[in-house]
Image (cartoon, grey):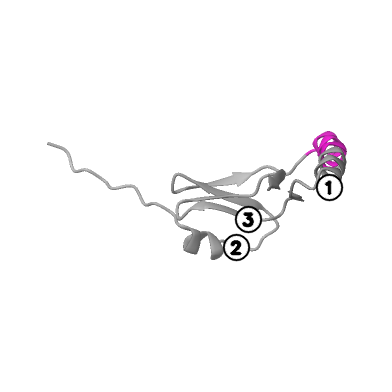
Amino acid sequence: MGISKEKIKFTYEDYLHLPDNGKRYQVIGGEVYMVPVPTPYHQDILLKLGILLREFVEEHKLGKVYCAPCDVILSEEDVVQPDIFFIC
């Protein structure tokens, strides 16, 4: 019978201590992922989408639209920085 190695699960507290080195990180299911830098094309699309969403949301008084970087804490072991998100 082999020795079972328990996987280390990262938490939001661990996330807060990751280096501030200009890279973006996310914790999903207790695992740390480095998120690649967005391309200029990606940023163009994000900006256009953000403007359209914000105008619609404000016009209909539905809530707020946010863009990265902004931590979204889904659980103690799930912390993400979506490119864009909506809160009603």
Instruction: In this rendered view, identify the residue nearer to me: 58 or 13.
Output: 58
Say few, some or many: other residues with alpha carbon within 10 Å of mark 2 (under 14 / 14 to 19 / 20 or more). Answer: few
Q: Which mark is residue 71?
A: 3
Query: How far across and how far down the image is residue 24, in percent?
Result: 65, 51
Q: Which residue is mark 1?
A: 58
Distance of mark 1 from mark 2, alpha carbons? 36 Å
Classified by dominant secondary structure, the portion drawn in magenta counts as: helix
Q: Earlier in the sequence, mark 1 or mark 3?
A: 1
Q: Is residue 62 above or below residue 70?
A: above
Residue 37: x and y in percent read 73, 44
- Quadrant of res 42: top right
Q: Which residues are magenta?
A: 39-50
What amino acid is found at the position of numbered circle 2 in the picture? Pro
User: Marks 1 and 3, Cα distance to the nearest angstrom?
Assistant: 22 Å
Q: Which residue is mark 2?
A: 19
Dot label at residue 86: none
